[in-house]
Amino acid sequence: MNSIFDSRSLRFIAAAMVVVNGFFPALWILLTSLKTEAELVSKPITYLPHQPTLANYVQAFTDQPLLKYLGNSLAVALSATAFSLLVSALAAYAIARLNLRRRQLILTCIVASSMFPLVTLLVPIFETMRTLGLLNSYTALVLPYIVLNLPVCTLVLVSFFQSIPKDLENAAMIDGCTRMGALLRVVVPLAAPGVFTAGILAFVNSWDEFLLALSLNSNPNFRTLPVGITLYQGEFTFPWPIISAALIVAIVPIAVLIAIFQERVVGGLTQGGLKG
Amino acid sequence: MAGVSVFDRWRDPSEKALGFMLLAPAFALLALIVAYPIGRLIWNSFFDLRLSGGGGIKFVGLENYLLVFQDPDFWNATKNTVLITLITVPGALIIGLGLALLANLPFKRKWPVRLALLLPWALPLAFAGLIFAWFFHTEYGVVNDVVRRATSGAGGQTEPTMWLLRPGWAFTAICMTIVWKTSSFMALILLAGLQMIPKSLYEAAEVDGASKWQQFWQITIPMLTPSIIVALIFRTITALQTFDIPYTMTKGGPGNSTETLAMLIHKTTIDYLDVGYGSTLAVCMFVLSLFVTAFYLKRIGKNA
Amino acid sequence: MIRRSTFTALASAVALMAGLASSSAALAQQTTLRVFSGGANQRPDLMRKLFDQYQAKNPNVKVEIETGGATSELQRQYLSTVLNAKDPAIDIYLIDIVNPAQYYGAGWLEPLDAYVGKPAEAFKAYLPVYLSSNVIDGKVAAMPAFADAMFMYYRKDLLDKHGVKEPKTWDELSAAASKIQRAEANPNLQGLSIQGAPIEGAVCTFLLPYWGQGKDFNDANGKLTLDKAAATKGLSQWLAMVDAGVIKRNVAEVKTPDTVNEFKAGQVVFAINWGFAWDRFKDDPDSKVQGKVGVMPLPAVADGKSATCVGGWQWAVSAFSKNKAAAAGLVKHLASAESSKFLAVEGSLLATYPGVYTDVDVVKNVPWFKDAANVVIAGRSRPMSKDYGQVSDIIRTTTSAVLARTKTPAEGVAEIESRLTRVMR
């Protein structure tokens, strides 16, 4: 077992630091969602709410159709993730396994597409979607999200595919598999941590994305969560308690998803290592 | 049976044909979504296109690029961006590696550590900035409150630090927030990489009498290198494009001491409606990103 | 006999014409107008009622609301994309008072002269400020929706308690605030709360003491006429108040909601803020200052004049709309005196017509309009430049930096001048 921290208490302290580091802001938001706005200007600042109230959650759901936004975000993020993985896996296999001549250039092209700040590409993308009649739909977001996720997912998968010895595939192909069969039955399962990693990256990227969601899906029926949460504020008001309540609603599905899939990402399938 | 039928070729195509088929979806999407925008961006950078002037467009060739090199705001923003990159990329890597190693340890209940690892990633970026701006607020921030409670015993009633109002402190606060947010991205990639290292290697090293440190440097790091490179590439590209966190924390202030290149581009395009110059800045950022990540990409290419 | 057939002929002719008339009415097009009406603070609920009124009077028009951003900033982001792409989907925009110049200059707004008349007559009945803010290149770029201004709110109870009169100059205000702060001996009590964060309101923070000295920022043609000494004096005035403890040290972190929340919690004696704050102080259940708040015109600098910043929102027709005439019709209704009165009574939104302030119903329902009237009518508009995006950014960023003490007032003013001379030619 690779372990730098030998003593148990050292490990525990380290773990505690990690947990505090990761949870503290979320915890702060949770506590804020139970306070009133007036309590937020009291001096000295309070941590636990003086008079906890669920009114903010009620208002979060009544001021805006928060559940609808949640549904939209889930639909878009899940589709984008699924398609991103599919497209990236195919491209990554080609780059990692095939002896293509311009492999370097292909990879650079894919990664280079992420080197332009999105704000400068916004207007042409908007025009494209408008021409295709796709504005205010799930597709309008899923297609660009696949492109946004392509660089990261492809590169992650390329590096994972590369770390799997070719002999395994060759063995499978000698046994009668086609290349595609070898890809699906040998490579992908072994690169599972990479696949799940790329999946989580794609999911969270798509979940969080703001600029495109703001510009392409302005119709409330198709609005996503990040944009919806900014609508609680006004020109002159920033109701932290209500926004916090909405943020908790936004984070919980992801936290649940992560808690479920963290086993797959972190452990499990390659516990025994490769036969090498 | 003579020759290869079309069906056979379809089921087991040549490498080149297969490569084409596998890459087609990715490139079709790239062509559809970003090829035209990127093309137009590069095209616009050669024009004086300022919407505030009524939208009149004038070809100026490389003049915009010359203006960029003479623009003190550009150099200031680039300096800030490079500084943020130099601080937060290694920072996120080191902390991410630590987090990944920790999450890899055999705890009885694994999910709290792993969830804590990934939760920063789950918080929407713009709100992470606002939350940390709150943490660093002079009067209502947790950071100053903790300092006050810690030092009140020592008798010193020092003035609370105005974190976001002093260029140096604001920069520090921003870098800390960025590292907090992105170290979980790094940790995720490194963690998956850690999982791919065969345990047998460690067992063999154990048998050979290697210490834990030696195992770390001679097994873990080399085996992790591909993952590290991948993580570094994306951390670097996104660091060069840092926007949301400084934008929500300080809006580039005080003055423009925390303004990044991406913020300058955003301001030029959206607020000033100077599309031509904004495009030029964007192309410069692209060139910078390409240059910085070029040598990373070569290593990935070679590894195959 | 002839009469009967004539009668029959006439009757059938009438019947025929009636039939034709009704079928042509049925053939009349249903026009759908889409209106972008801002965020929560722009009261889309009240606007919806105005739209319903219009729909009732014009059955062939249907009005739909679009939202796309809660703050000016986010709206700018959204509108910039949509208008840059020349999108015809939205017909009418509700925009901030500082935007008509920039948007018209970019060719995004349809001039409304054909529908409302030339600028002089179109704006005759309105507050004087609209002649400068809504008229670009001699054309009517937008019609007023509702007004706003920066007011000086103060704790009437504290002033009465310590025998202080309403200050007329900034020096008097500073002295009054200090006196009250010392007497109350409450370390959390701020004398004056202003907005120093690099938000749009900071432009006003810069202009208020400058205008208070009777100076102009630009001439009628939009050329910069900055009096550097006066500007430096204005910024130094704020810093002097920080040094005296009247304004808090971290003023460069203060945004509009912060001032409101702190005043509501009873932590502030004087506060500068927009009109919406009045209702918050009066009606919010958690307000500790109910019944204790007064409002007065902004102080002047000694020997100067009282001046305030005008805000508010405007209706504009998109240059890419496919229903311009119908849209202009709706805009005329929305900018009418009746609509202004409706918004005043129902939403306490400041009226765009001086007449509305003295209307009997309005005075009965929103008594504070009596005090507000003088302030709004005397309000001044921020520099109306087609490059307002740049102008605003320069002023607010530099002002905030000066208030954060990373630049001295002299340095800040020099920077404003050098950057703006290029822009405001």
Image (cartoon, coloured by chain):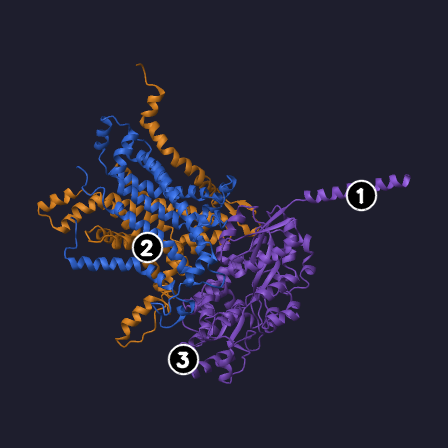
Chain colours: A blue, B orange, C purple
Which is in the foreground here, disc 1 or disc 3?
1
A54 left or right of C63 in image: left
On the image, the x and y values in percent for residue A36 come to 41, 67
Relative placement, left or right, of C5 versus A270 is right
Verify CB contact (< 8 Å) between mark 1 and mark 3: no
Amino acid, disc 2: Pro
Which SS class for mark 2? Answer: helix
- Could you tell me which quadrant the N terminus of chain B lies in? top left
Q: Position of residue B79 (x, y in %)?
A: 37, 55
In the picture as drawn, the residue positioned furthest to the top comes out as: B2
Q: Residue at x 67, y 54 (%)?
A: C57
Q: In the rendering, at what x and y percent does residue C75 appear?
A: 50, 55
Is residue B255 in view? no
- Specify whether residue A186 is in view: yes
Q: Residue furthest bottom?
A: C163
A36 lies left or right of C48: left
Asked whether disc 2 touches disc 3, contact meaning CB atoms under 8 Å apart, the reply is: no
CA separation in Å, label 2 and label 3 = 39 Å
Residue denoted by label 2 = B120
Measure the alpha-carbon separation of dots 1 and 3: 85 Å
The answer to whether B302 is drawn above or below residue C365 in the figure is above
**Mark 3 or mark 1, which is nearer the start of the sequence?**
1
- Comparing B246 with B137, the one in front is B137
- The chain ID associated with circle 3 is C
Q: Read off the residue under disc 1.
A: C14
Q: Nearer the viewer, residue A182 or C60?
A: C60
Residue type at tag 3? Asn
Helix, strand or loop at label 3? It is loop
Residue density around tag 1, few if under 14, some if 14–19, many if 20 or more, within 10 Å: few
Query: Badge 3 is on which residue?
Result: C186
Residue placed most toward the observer, B36 or C58: C58
Label 2 and label 1: CA atoms lie apart by 77 Å
